[in-house]
Amino acid sequence: GVTVSKQYPQLTLSANLGSQALTAASLFGSGSLIWGVAGQLAQPLFKPGLKAEARAAEAGFDAAAANYRETVLQGLRQVADVLRSLEHDAQALQAQSAAVASAQTSLQLVEQQYALGTASALQLLTAQQQRQQTRIGLIAAQAARLNDTALLYQALGGGLQPQTRSRQASSDIDLLAPMPM
């Protein structure tokens, strides 16, 4: 662009307008106005580095375009990676929810057996511990999903507005609400 334009003639025009007088009263009179117009035409005759400058400018443009393409591809890779993580998180969350339900059912059976005297206190404590461990796993899966959701927002270049941040935080807290025992 600019480097190539240096090969062609350059035309410069300038104009001046003013006033001139010996006294302040005649400063704005019709005879005190002065003006001038000037023009200049310049043509480079010999500039040995002009073609090299043009090639360097084109190379700079190509490098900037390649950098832009790489940035776009990197952003697309980040989005794809986070979407894969979210898919994995959904599967883990589903599996962990099933594990919690199974541990809860197991605990209820052991509680009934304990009430009837066919299970020991140790078996009851073990079932309670197992249920708590699965609940901890569920909470960890929920946290991973929320974290990956935030990473998706970031990868897409978005963010939350200040007024929606509190509403979003309260809905996220609802997701992490304790499960009934």
Image (cartoon, grey):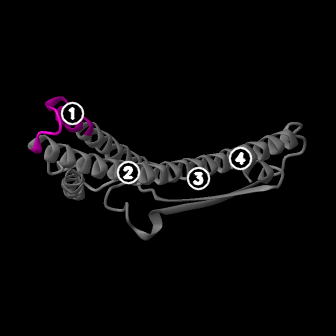
> Is label 2 in a helix, a strand or a loop?
helix
Q: Which residues are magenta?
A: 116-130
Give the mark, 1 or 3, whose residue is nearer the N terminus.
3
> Is label 4 in a helix, a strand or a loop?
helix
The image shows residue 8 at horizontal and vertical percentages of: 82, 55
Task: State the residue at coordinates (28%, 56%).
Answer: 161
Query: What residue is disc 1 on?
Result: 123
Give the mark, 1 or 4, whose residue is nearer the N terminus.
4
In 3D space, how far apart are the residues under numbered discs 1 and 2 (Cα atoms)?
Answer: 27 Å
Residue type (three-letter) at the residue carrying disc 2:
Leu
In 3D space, how far apart are the residues under numbered discs 1 and 4 (Cα atoms)?
Answer: 65 Å
> Is label 3 in a helix, a strand or a loop?
helix
Location of residue 70 with respect to 49 vertically, above or below: below
Badge 3: how crowded within 10 Å, few (<14), some, or many (20+)? some
Badge 2: how crowded within 10 Å, few (<14), some, or many (20+)? many
Query: What residue is disc 4 on?
Result: 66
**Magenta stretch holds residue 126:** yes
Task: State the residue at coordinates (26%, 43%).
Answer: 135
Q: Nearer the viewer, mark 1 or mark 3?
A: 1
Query: What residue is disc 3 on?
Result: 76
Front residue (pair 83, 125): 125
Query: What residue is disc 2 on?
Result: 93
**Quadrant (top left, top right, bottom left, bottom right) of the N terminus:** bottom right
The image shows residue 172 at horizontal and vertical percentages of: 24, 53
